[in-house]
Image (cartoon, rainbow, N blue to C red):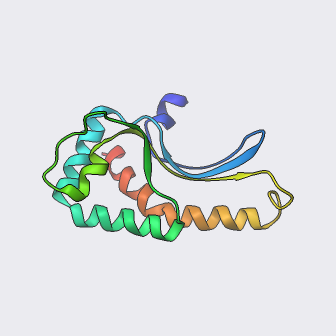
Amino acid sequence: DVEWWAENPCLYFEINPDRVHYGFFFYRVRPQLMETIRRDMVENPDNFLKMIRKVEKDTGIPVTADEQYKRPKPTDNPKLEPYFAWKGQIGCVAEEAFNPETFGPELGERVKKLITQLMPLYDYFCKFTQQ
């Protein structure tokens, strides 16, 4: 059901015609849910920022949003400003173009390692969708 998974954080693995993708994706974040997430960021900025920094450091992949507000929501905390611009399609995704090693046994290990490193990000967003 596209409506369900699109509105919930997902850890995924996908094979396309020319590459593999895997990681974390939160495709369609409802506006009222994003407001709840922003309130949590304001109430617990150190926890949120520490989690984001750890995920990015461990994975080597930035946590980004493909959809951003042209005029970001205001915040008194300059460290949160980039995240207050997030509108939707939040992700931390690895992509690999097909090569001779793509489907070797190491692929499973790479996917497993990344998914494990992304669990704090997944758990963070899940706590808002399971209320």
Please identify the residue farthest to the right as the structure is shown.
Answer: 100
Q: Quarter-wise, where is residue 111 in the image? A: bottom right
Q: Quarter-wise, where is residue 88 in the image? A: top left
- The structure residue drawn at horizontal position 24% and vertical position 47%, both measured from the top left corner, is 38
Quarter of the image with the C terminus in it: top left
Q: Position of residue 63 (x, y in %)?
A: 44, 54
Q: Image check: 46 left or right of 63?
A: left
**Front-most of residues 17 and 124:** 17
- The structure residue drawn at horizontal position 29% and vertical position 61%, both measured from the top left corner, is 48
- The structure residue drawn at horizontal position 61% and vertical position 68%, both measured from the top left corner, is 113
Quarter of the image with the N terminus in it: top right
Q: Position of residue 64 (x, y in %)?
A: 43, 49
Q: Quarter-wise, where is residue 124 in the image? A: bottom left
Q: How many marks?
A: 0
Q: Position of residue 93 (x, y in %)?
A: 56, 52
The answer to whether residue 6 is above or below residue 129 is: above
Q: Image check: 44 left or right of 65?
A: left
Q: Position of residue 36 (x, y in %)?
A: 24, 43
**Front-most of residues 70 and 115:** 70
The answer to whether residue 47 is above or below residue 123 is: below
- The structure residue drawn at horizontal position 21% and vertical position 39%, both measured from the top left corner, is 73
